[in-house]
Amino acid sequence: MVSTRPSNASKKIAQVVIDTQQNRRTSAQVQEDNAHLQREKQEQEAKTHKGIAKVAAVQDKLAVQEQKATAARKPRPRPVGKTAAATTATKMALPPSQAKATGPKKGAAAKAAEA
């Protein structure tokens, strides 16, 4: 007759299958786990909103500083030379039909090319 070896007498052959099975939980345990996960999610969202609020505050502060810096510089009119003032006055004095485009003074080479 066949007998079991002494080394296998106390071994559980199906232990591998038992270890891979998922343990069953009661409905109370499931509710507790769900409540815990929900609390963790709310805490994480609170941390995220707090971080976003900090970043927004810093951005607002920088925007105010930038506005103050740009408001401090007042735009100044550009200085107008004598030739620019004379051409502007001439253009305004002549009617549009007689006004011709006057640009900067041309040299002798440009006048020769024009003729």
Image: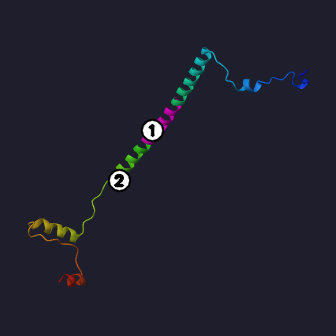
The part of the chain drawn in magenta is 46-60
Residue 48 place in picture, x, y as percent: 51, 33
Identify the residue at horizontal 41%, vertical 44% (top origin).
63
Q: Quadrant of residue 86?
A: bottom left
The majority secondary structure of the magenta stretch comes to helix
Which circle, 1 or 2, is nearer the viewer? 1
Question: Which amino acid type is marked by label 2?
Answer: Arg
Relative horizontal placement of residue 97, taking residue 85 as reference (left or right): left
Q: Residue at x 14, y 71 (%)?
A: 100
Q: Is residue 73 above or below residue 104?
A: above
Q: Secondary structure beneath disc 1? A: helix
Under tag 2, what secondary structure? Answer: loop
Count of numbered badges drawn on the protein: 2
* Relative side of 43 to 71, left or right: right
Q: In this picture, is 109 found above or below 75?
A: below
- Front residue of 24 and 5: 5
Instruction: Identify the image quadrant of the N terminus.
Output: top right
Q: Where does label 1 land, which residue?
A: 56
Q: Residue furthest front?
A: 1
Seen in the image, is 110 located left or right of residue 27? left
Residue at x-position 23% and y-position 84%: 108
